Amino acid sequence: MRKVYGRRDFAIIGELIEPRTRVLDLGCGEGELLAWLKENKQVDGRGVEMEGARVQKAIARGASVYQGDLESAVEDYPDKAFDYVILSQTLQETRYPLRVLNGMLRVGKRAVVAFPNFGHYSVRLAWLLTGRAPRTDLFPYDWFDSPNIHFLTVLDFEALVAKQGWKVERKIFVAGARQVTWMPNLMAEIAVFEVSGQG
Amino acid sequence: MVTEVASRTFDRLELDSGITLAPVEVAYETYGELNADRSNAVMVTHAFSGDAHAAGEGGWWSTMIGPGKAFDTDKYFVICSNVLGGCRGTTGPGSINPETGCPWAMSFPQVTIADMVRLQKMLIDHMGIGRLLTVSGGSMGGMQALEWAATYPDRVASAIPIATTARHSAQQIAFNEVGRQAIMADPDWNGGNYYGARLPGRGLAVARMVGHITYMSDESMREKFGRKLRTPDQFEVESYLKYRGYKFVDRFDANSYIYITRAMDTFDLTQRGALQTLFELNKARFLLISFTSDWLYPPYQSLEIVKALRGRNCDVAYCNLDARYGHDSFLVEVEQQTEVVRGFLASTFREAAANA
């Protein structure tokens, strides 16, 4: 997903992260965001990434990245070791999203979660008009070839936060290059939530 | 590349066993030039059968050390010394015991990985280097890198332990014991007193042959030898192992084999407490590397260390490189290893300069 959306979620996440904080980036890819945060926000960053070739690129870039499965990787860190734990465009790919979110809020004071909004009107229209699993700019994969195994909307995520008793500290919605404020569940392509609470 | 081959004698070295070795000599080589603020020094630690000759023609890590290589000698000052207990210029069982005027042989005191590192630290103290940019090595060299980081955390900005472990498994001890028994079973070994007489060449060669098998992978052996025949009644792999085994006899002392493998087997970082506690508050950066086909030092052993470091939120990077050559990968399959080491070292150097 990151490749599709280029650096757009980086700009948003970069804005949320306070300077000189401790950050863990789950599913950090080639470490671009960590490098950006180190350069621009002087953060003390760590990353977790599964795919070996990406890990090598990330380490070569100077990021402290661990090659492993992010769902179990979170378990090893001490409580509240980080100010922020970032999960960018990966929540919908994890087997047990709630377990991952709980882990993020245990090891971090804040969880920053960015995900593609399955409630976007283009997805709804595609499904309604074709009667097939939607393939849009936002969800560009065939159903049999997709890393996405959960399809959640802005409302779904907010309902989970309420159910768990977490708190949304900040949220940002975007479509294209613009910020969305009106009817985000229908209009937002990407949702970014900053959440606090007990994991 | 500016290369210096040197040797230094120190008055005394206290060993873990309580025995003091006096005097003690250490052979070392350096490559590149130390910068004005002495902040670009890299200590490279050799594996079991290596020596101080790490770079240049015939150097054991010449693939990694040199101008433009992972340990770039245009940027860094690289130091490599022969380990204590070795037979390539540093004091070991083949050295003369000053009290008797004869070789120590098996009366040489037992040495540990920590003793080897203590001697290396004396060397960098002597060179006036306050803090090493990194300590790096594979296999037993990785044990030394870990020992450095655990014992002298303020003297290293980072450590790069490769294809290594915090302690040998029963399997690793077992292979070493087969090697030791092969040497001791050779009548020429004579309780270790063979200096000036016939060397226990057959035993040492067999020990080396076993070692070589453990350094390769099933896949790399299949590719290299398969079932090819050298002569009508000898397989290619048999001929290769014999060649490597007997070649080893020319350059390695059988008693050093016994002493150094014992040092590896007794190395156990967890004896000083849980790994997590050992590295608590450690400010050094770590890069650990393992290889998918390494069955002698399997990735789980690197992961055990990485897990402990992450448990204390130490600054650690880890990758399990896709490699076909087994344990030998860190010496021969260096393309990916070069990429990660080069980048890690460059960022560590930048950060160390920024924090200085």
Image (cartoon, coloured by chain):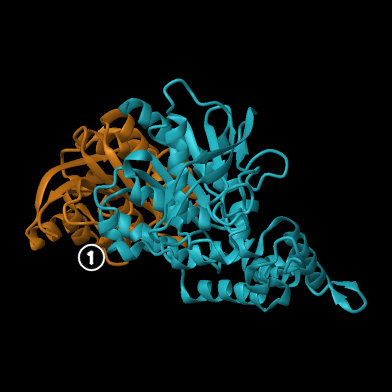
Chain colours: A orange, B cyan
Location of mark 1 (residue): A99
Query: Pointer 1 indicates a residue of which chain?
Result: A
Q: Secondary structure at mark 1?
A: helix
**x, y (%) of residue B75?**
53, 28
Comparing A144 with B116, the one in front is: B116
Q: Is residue B82 placed above or below B233 in the rendered structure? A: above
* Residue visible at 42% across and 22% down in the picture: B37
* Residue visible at 76% across and 64% down in the picture: B197
On the rendered image, what quadrant is the C terminus of chain B found in?
top left
Q: Is residue B78 placed above or below B337 in the rendered structure? A: above
Left of A104 or right of it: where is B108? Answer: right
Note whether residue A28 is visible: no
Circle 1 packing at 10 Å, graded few (<14), some (14-19), many (20+), is: some
Q: Is residue A71 placed above or below B352 in the rendered structure? A: below
Comparing B66 with A35, the one in front is: B66
**x, y (%) of residue A182?**
15, 40
* Residue visible at 8% across and 58% down in the picture: A162
Give the amino acid type for the residue marked by disc 1 in the picture. Answer: Arg
Comparing A2 with B309, the one in front is: B309
Left of A163 or right of it: where is A7? Answer: right
